[in-house]
Image (cartoon, helix red, strand yellow):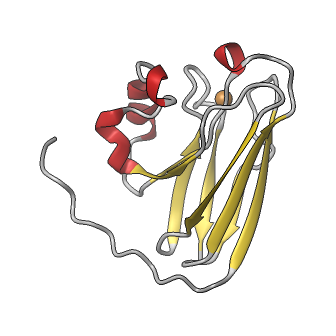
Amino acid sequence: GGAKKPAEAAPKKTGEKTTVAIEVGDGLAYNIKEIKVKEGATVELSIKHTGKMDKTAMGHNFVLLKKGTDMTAFATAAIGAKDTGYIPAAMKDQVIAHTKVVGGGESDSISFTAPAKGEYQYLCTFPGHYSVMNGKMIVS
Ligand code: CU
């Protein structure tokens, strides 16, 4: 590990809850390209693969990146990180929250606190997917 960036202050939990239901399938697409949440809200996010293809061929995940993270660099590093669910160990500290990789018929759900106000990028880090499978989380 190199020098650490200064830690962003974590927002206080507000007690508000937001549910986000992402669906993916046998193509390269999220059903949601923009997620809006309030700072400090508890985000309960699920990802459901409604397709039939196995995760080794058409796996998808949801990875929410910290501000300032280079999405292309992250996705490129992720290609070699199959054993860790396509989350590169060296860049793990750039991730706010992520699901596991799901294949046809599978789903996963996570819960995290919405970060400070601003825009954040999310992507699927399965090799070759991020340039189409990405979106924005807008925190207000
Ligand atoms: Cu994908």
Residue 18 in the image: state x and y as whole percent.
72, 71
Camera-side residue of 106 and 67: 106
Q: Residue at x 76, y 34 (%)?
A: 29
**Which quadrant of the view contains residue 113?**
bottom right
Image point (70%, 76%), residue name: 17
Label total for image:
0
**137 in relation to 114, above or below:** above
Instruction: Judge by depth and name the residue closer to the eye, 83 or 29.
Output: 83
Identify which residue is drawn at 13% across, 43% down.
2
Rendered-image quadrant of the N terminus: top left
- Image quarter for ligand 1: top right
Residue found 52% across the figure and 57% down from its top: 120
List the single residue furthest toward the top: 57
Horizontal and vertical percent for residue 63? 55, 44
Q: Residue furthest left?
A: 3
The image quarter in which residue 48 lies: top right
**Where is the C terminus found, in terms of image quarters?**
bottom right
> 111 above or below 140?
above
Q: In the image shown, does 83 or 134 lie closer to the viewer?
A: 83
Q: Is residue 34 left or right of residue 87?
A: right
